[in-house]
Image (cartoon, helix red, strand yellow):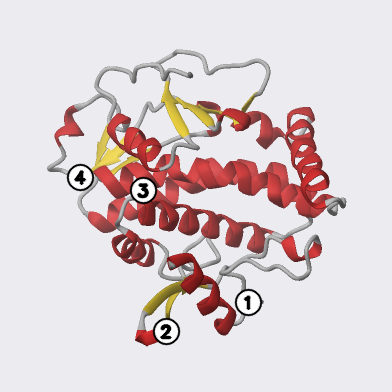
Amino acid sequence: MLLSAPAPAGSPVARAYERLTDAYPGLRAEERGAHEPLPRGVGWVGAHELAAGGAALDAHLAWDEAQVLRDYGRRARPDVVAGFGLHRYAWPACLLITVPWFLERRVPRLPVDRVAFHRTRGLMSVRVEEFACLPDDPAACLPGARVVPGEEALREEVRAAVAQHLGPLLEGFGPRMRRGRRALWAMAADEVVEGLWYLGSLLGEERRAVRELELLLPGALAPYTGAAGFRTLTGPGGAELTTRDRASCCFFYTIRPEDTCTTCPRTCDADRVTRLTAADG
C-alpha cells in the first residue's frame, strides 16, 4: 500500500487534492514543502523535462507507443503517439489547477519546474508556492496568497495558470504532433473541459461543473482556441443528455476506424444518444 506524504502545513490545496483522490483513486497529488525537491528516479519525469523535448520526452512517448501496439495490435503514427502522450499528462495536470478552483475557489500557480509525474502510479508531485483566491477566503492570509477582486478575475487566474503550465509543454510536444499553434491550444481547452467535467460527474456536481466551464471558456479567449462547447441532446423519454463537441481531435480513429470518442465531431448525435443512454443504464 502506498502512503501519501502529509501536505505542508497551511496548504491551500490539500483538501481539494484529497477530494480529487477520493473521487478518482487513479490520481493522487502529493505536495512538497517550500524548497523541497521534486522526486526523481525510475518512473518519474519532471514537467520541465517533457517541455524540453529531449530524451525524457522520448521515453515518455515510448510508453504510449508500446501501449498502442500491445492493446490494439498495430503501430500508431508518431504524431498520434505524441498526441496520446500529451493527453495522458495534460489531463491530470489540468486537474491540479481546476479542482482547487472548483472546490475551494483557490487557483495554484504551477510552473513546469514545480510538477513531476509518475504515470504508472498515477501520482503527481507538486510544490505550490503561489495561489490566487477571493477576498473573503480564510486562506488569503497564507504565504503566497494573491487576492483577486471577484469570480471573473479568478477565472482569468485559472486560464493564466493552465496556460503558464501547458504552454512550455505544447512547445515540447508540438513538433512531434505536427500540429500548429491553434490546434495545440484547442487541445489544451479540451483537456481543461473534459477533465473537470468528468470529475464533476464523479463528485455528483456535473451540472455545476458544466456551468463553471461555460463561464471559464465561453469562446476563443487567447491563447485558447476552443470553448467549453456543451450542448443538450434529447434521449429516450425526453431525458436531457449533456454532450459537447471537442475543439481538437485525438486521431484515435487512425488506429480503430470504427471507433470515435463520444465528444468527437465525427460522432453523430444518434450514436451519442445511444452511448450516453447505455452508460446511464
* In this view, the mark in front (4 or 2): 2
In the picture of the structure, the residue carrying the numbered disc 1 is 267
Indicate the secondary structure of the residue bearing disc 1. Answer: loop
Q: Which residue is drawn at the image coordinates 44% and 30% (left, top)? A: 29
* In this view, the mark in front (2 or 1): 2
Q: CA distance from mark 3 to mark 1?
A: 33 Å
Q: Determine contact: label 4, label 2, CB under 8 Å.
A: no
Front-most of residues 2 and 112 = 2
In the picture of the structure, the residue carrying the numbered disc 3 is 157
Alpha-carbon neighbours of circle 2 within 10 Å: few (<14), some, or many (≥20)?
Answer: few
Which corner quadrant holds the C terminus?
Answer: bottom left
Indicate the secondary structure of the residue bearing disc 4. Answer: loop
* In this view, the mark in front (3 or 1): 1
Q: Does residue 1 appear to the left or right of 42 in the view shown? A: left
- Which of the numbered marks, if any, corresponds to residue 236? 2
Indicate the secondary structure of the residue bearing disc 3. Answer: helix
The answer to whether any part of residue 145 appears in the image is: yes
* In this view, the mark in front (3 or 2): 2
- Give residue 64's position: percent from left, percent from top: 75, 42
- Name above or below for residue 185 compared with residue 265: above
Q: CA distance from mark 2 to mark 1?
A: 18 Å
- Give residue 212's position: percent from left, percent from top: 32, 61
The residue at the far top in this view is 36
- Which of the numbered marks, if any, corresponds to residue 134? 4
Q: Earlier in the sequence, mark 4 or mark 2?
A: 4
Q: Which residue is drawn at the image coordinates 79% and 34% (left, top)? A: 58
- Name above or below for residue 119 compared with residue 221: above
Front-most of residues 92 and 153 = 92
Q: Determine contact: label 2, label 1, CB under 8 Å.
A: no
**Mark 3 belongs to which amino acid?**
Glu
Q: CA distance from mark 4 to mark 2?
A: 42 Å
